[in-house]
Structure formats: C-alpha cells, structure tokens
C-alpha cells in the first residue's frame, strides 16, 4: 500500500497544486480582452499549456517506471516554462495588467524549480542504482 496522501508517485497536495495552477490559468484566460487578436492568440496558447501542466502531473503520478516518470515530469516542466512565456508576453507586450499575470508567473517559476528538482533526483537515483549493479 502507498504512503498516506499519495496518489501513485506524487502527493495529492502536489497534484492539487498543479490543478489549482490550471484553474488560475482558466480564470486568467476568462478575464483577458479577447477583442485584440494578439491577446486572443496568446491567451489560447496559455490556456493550452497551463492546463497541460496538471495533465502531465496526473500522468506522471501513474508512471510505471522511473524513465516514464522523468519523461512525464519533463513534459510538465516544458508546459510550465511555456506558460510562463505566454504570461510574460501578455504582460510585457500586450499591456495586460500585472495583477492578472504575476501570481501565475510566480507559481510557474516555483513549479519549474520543483519539476527540475524531481527530474534531477530521479536521474541521480537511476545513476546510483546503475552503479550498484555494475
């Protein structure tokens, strides 16, 4: 049986955190002025990448191997980084109010750091196990 509060390889708390990030992205998208083409396009890109973060985390929590876990984590990392780009562009180039983007920008930065740490630790574990077997 798994650890309490765990769903597969990841805690329910972390899964909920990425789901909340996706929800925040949805709420941000709803508030964007869709009358401007550039905002509409960047907003859709943000909506896709921001919700994909949570989807990749769900997939990673069910990974059957360390390799699959790292792969799904890597997907979540890429989507979080892409989300951060769209948020920055909306704020910096499209004059979207910083109050609409900055909390999400901060959260995407934290998620990027967490995903990077998880990936690195899993790879280090794989390397250590590989050395033991030799």
Image (cartoon, helix red, strand yellow):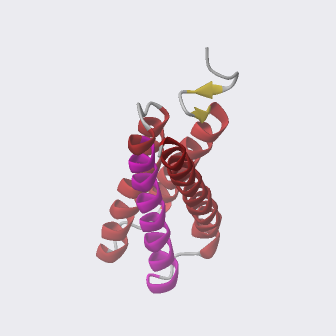
Q: Position of residue 44 (x, y in %)?
A: 34, 60
Q: In the current view of this chain or complex, which residue is farthest to the bottom?
A: 93
Residue drawn at x 60%, y 57% as measured from the top left:
117
Viewer-closest of 16 and 118: 118
Viewer-closest of 63 and 65: 65
* Above/below status of 106 relative to 13: below
Q: Position of residue 27 (x, y in %)?
A: 52, 52
Residue drawn at x 57%, y 68% as measured from the top left:
101
Q: Please count the marks in the image.
A: 0
Residue 25 visible somewhere in the drawing: yes
Q: In the current view of this chain or complex, which residue is farthest to the right?
A: 4
Q: Position of residue 79 (x, y in %)?
A: 42, 59
Main SS of the magenta part reads helix
Whether residue 127 appears in magenta in the rendering, the answer is: no
Whether residue 77 appears in magenta in the rendering, the answer is: yes
Q: In the figure, is residue 58 to the left or right of 3? A: left
Q: Position of residue 68 (x, y in %)?
A: 38, 41
Q: In the figure, is residue 79 to the left or right of 37? A: right
Quadrant showing the N terminus: top right
Residue 51 visible somewhere in the drawing: no
Residue drawn at x 30%, y 68% as measured from the top left:
41
Q: In the current view of this chain or complex, which residue is farthest to the top?
A: 1
Viewer-closest of 72 and 132: 132
For the record, the magenta segment spans 69-94
Residue drawn at x 50%, y 77% as measured from the top left:
88
């Amino acid at each position: 049986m798994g650890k309490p509060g765990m769903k597969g390889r990841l805690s329910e708390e972390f899964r909920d955190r990425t789901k909340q990030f996706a929800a925040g992205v949805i709420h941000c998208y709803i508030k964007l002025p869709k009358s401007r083409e550039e905002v509409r396009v960047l907003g859709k890109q943000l909506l896709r990448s921001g919700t994909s973060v949570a989807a990749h985390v769900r997939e990673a929590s069910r990974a059957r191997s360390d390799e699959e876990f790292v792969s799904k984590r890597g997907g979540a990392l890429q989507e979080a980084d892409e989300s951060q780009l769209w948020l920055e562009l909306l704020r910096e180039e499209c004059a979207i109010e910083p109050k609409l983007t900055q909390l999400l920008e901060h959260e995407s930065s934290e998620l990027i750091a967490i995903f990077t740490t998880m990936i690195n630790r899993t790879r280090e574990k794989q390397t250590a196990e590989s050395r033991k077997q030799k």
